[in-house]
Image (cartoon, rainbow, N blue to C red):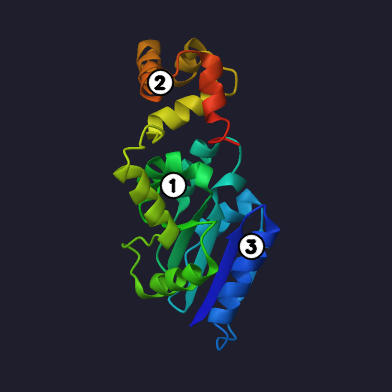
């Protein structure tokens, strides 16, 4: 069976590294091909194409390389993703971890690889991908350990819901709650509640501190 690997990442060095690992893993498969790009529209195109039974497509997508409005970009990916004979592997950096549960709820059929994963753990992750069906998600070793450590130590304050993530993206564009309310036809009191609840959970008292807290999450 032919395999195609599509790597969407602005960090070409990381893409080349993943390509090398996969090439070594499939050294006896001459039919494997690679596409390396940072073009979001090519990513959408490959997601929505129907794959044949004779071809597996592995799509690696770096969260930080998505367009600035990432929440909307991910919703678009979810809308177009046709997962038969495809595996979507989301690439996360550690500063993306507060978004993990929101990401997983958006793309429950995706697989998850932490970009700082040790090389010796990447091949087992890829081998697990080969042996699982499209309805089972795979998680890299360090990603599981990281999440387990945070949960065990009660460090869950920075875990964002989808609504909180979306609202913070809009606020960081310089929009007021009233402006956002008018644009999306949501009661401003509802938006205010989401923001106040988030600030209380993070023990943040003003907008400046709120913006500073999210600089690392939305680089």
**Mark 2 or 3 closer to N-term?**
3
Tell me the SS state at disc 1.
Answer: helix
Number of other residues with Cα within 10 Å of mark 2, as a class: few under 14, some 14 to 19, many 20 or more: few
Q: CA distance from mark 2 to mark 1?
A: 35 Å
Q: Nearer the viewer, mark 1 or mark 3?
A: 3
Q: Nearer the viewer, residue 146 or 10?
A: 146
In the image, is 105 to the left or to the right of 36?
A: left
Image: 2 above or below 58:
below
Q: CA distance from mark 1 to mark 3?
A: 25 Å
User: Quick check: can you spot residue 140?
Assistant: no
**Mark 1 or 3 closer to N-term?**
3
User: Quick check: can you spot residue 33?
Assistant: yes
x and y percent of residue 109 in the render? 37, 56
Q: Residue furthest front?
A: 153
Tell me the SS state at disc 2.
Answer: loop
Looking at the image, which residue is at 51% across and 67% down?
58
Q: Nearer the viewer, mark 2 or mark 3?
A: 2
All told, the count of numbered labels is 3
In the image, is 94 to the left or to the right of 131?
A: right
Q: Which residue in the structure is indicated by mark 3?
A: 15
Q: Nearer the viewer, residue 174 or 93?
A: 93
Image: 172 above or below 88:
above
Q: Nearer the viewer, mark 2 or mark 1?
A: 2
Q: Which residue in the structure is indicated by mark 1?
A: 79
Number of other residues with Cα within 10 Å of mark 1, as a class: few under 14, some 14 to 19, many 20 or more: some
Q: Which residue in the structure is indicated by mark 2?
A: 203
Q: Nearer the viewer, residue 202 or 33?
A: 202
Tell me the SS state at disc 3.
Answer: helix
Image quadrant of residue 197?
top left
Q: Which mark is residue 27?
A: none
**Mark 2 or 1 closer to N-term?**
1
């Amino acid at each position: 069976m032919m395999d195609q690997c599509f790597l969407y990442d602005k960090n070409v060095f990381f893409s080349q590294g993943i390509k090398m690992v996969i090439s070594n893993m499939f050294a006896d498969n001459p039919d494997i091909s690679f596409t390396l790009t940072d073009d979001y529209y090519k990513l959408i195109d490959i997601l929505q194409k129907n794959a044949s039974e004779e071809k597996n497509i592995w799509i690696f997508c770096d969260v930080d390389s998505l367009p600035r409005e990432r929440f909307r970009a991910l919703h678009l990916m979810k809308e177009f993703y046709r997962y038969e004979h495809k595996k979507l592997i989301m690439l996360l950096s550690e500063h993306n971890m507060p978004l993990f549960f929101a990401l997983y709820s958006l793309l429950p059929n995706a697989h998850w690889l932490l970009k700082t994963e040790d090389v010796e753990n990447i091949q087992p992750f890829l081998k697990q991908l080969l042996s699982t069906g499209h309805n089972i998600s795979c998680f890299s070793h360090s990603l599981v350990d990281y999440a387990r450590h945070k949960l065990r130590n009660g460090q869950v304050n920075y875990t964002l819901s989808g609504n909180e993530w979306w609202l913070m993206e809009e606020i960081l564009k310089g929009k007021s709650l009233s402006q956002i309310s008018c644009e999306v036809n949501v009661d401003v009191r509802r938006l205010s509640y989401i923001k106040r609840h988030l600030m209380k959970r993070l023990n943040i008292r003003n907008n400046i501190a709120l913006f500073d807290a999210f600089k690392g999450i939305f680089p």
